[in-house]
Image (tube, rainbow, N blue to C red):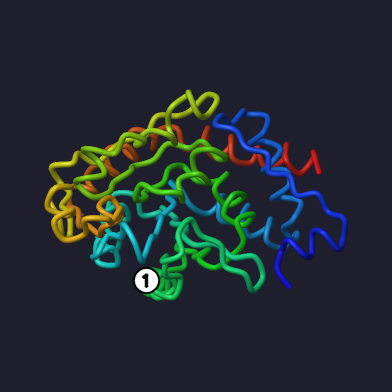
Amino acid sequence: VNSEEVLYNKNIFNLSIKANYVHESTASQILRGALYDLEADVIDEIKSFRRNFFPIVIIGLRCGTRAWEKQREGYNEVIESVLNKHPEAGFIIDGMNSIKTEVHSSHANIDMDEELNIANKLSMNRSNVISLIGESVNHSLVWGEIADCFVSPWGAGLAKYKWVNNIKGVVFSSKCVLEEKNDLHIYDDDRYRELAVKDIWLPAVFATNAEYNSIEEYKKVHPNGNGFYYQNFNVDSTKLSEVVLSYLDNIAKCSEELKYKSFKVLTYLEEGK
């Protein structure tokens, strides 16, 4: 039975509501719904993590397409670099989400198994690292409310951290995406998100394309293809770590204020259940 038959037989009218602008009130309503979906013990775990660690950094994984080929090694370097200067830091590993047995992603070729593998290795023997890979979107959104920043490749995963949580982060991608993508700032531009917080971008000079250096080179091999901007890439993980540390060093003096903001937001959302 296809979806059209189900809609017809149950007299359901399928309506898609779309817009190209996210209001602050919309994001707050989404967060309230996300919080309502979580069990009390999960909320307690989130609050405990906030109390115990600062700064808290989201590590965004993406495997399959437009993936950082050496992200396990690279992110390990980022984590170690942060811990060397901020030994009380905590990390939230985020990526593909799922709803019960159904997996949701922005692209059919996203590889959750590989994300789980990387997350397991990054969190091994680290009590200050928690993985949300395979958890619901609601988990990611509420955990995102206690994060002080994120590090993530450019892509649809940023919708959580930017359009809903609206937190500042360090964004990176392939050289071609950073230099040529015409919709690069849809996540941190106030034309798309009310009160949008601007991100920090890894300069394109520290990124490479895995296969094709130009669209012309790609079209010679794939004349009818549209995957040039989906190719994998690598970045200079040492430089990425430096960019992340530069931001964290600036917010370290605001630790108590940032923790207070996190708890205030969570309390506000809980009261609005």
- From the image, which quarter does the N terminus lie in? bottom right
The residue wearing badge 1 is 118
Left or right, 20 with respect to 47, comes to left
Q: Secondary structure at mark 1?
A: helix
Q: Nearer the viewer, residue 223 or 144?
A: 223
- Vertical arrangement, residue 190 with respect to residue 138, above or below: above
Tell me which residue sits at (25%, 66%) in the image: 73
- Vertical arrangement, residue 91 with respect to residue 197, above or below: below
Dot 1 alpha-carbon crowd within 10 angstroms: few under 14, some 14 to 19, many 20 or more: many
The kind of residue on which mark 1 rests is Ile
**Occupied quadrant, residue 242:** top left
- From the image, which quarter does the C terminus lie in? top right
Left or right, 67 with respect to 60, comes to left
Tell me which residue sits at (62%, 70%) in the image: 102
Q: Nearer the viewer, residue 222 or 63?
A: 222
Tell me which residue sits at (27%, 55%) in the image: 224
Left or right, 200 with respect to 37, comes to left
Q: Nearer the viewer, residue 189 or 48?
A: 189
- Residue 163 image offset from top left, x and y in percent: 53, 38
- Vertical arrangement, residue 102 with respect to residue 154, above or below: below
- Vertical arrangement, residue 108 with respect to residue 53, above or below: below
Q: Nearer the viewer, residue 31 or 223?
A: 223
- Residue 86 image offset from top left, x and y in percent: 34, 50
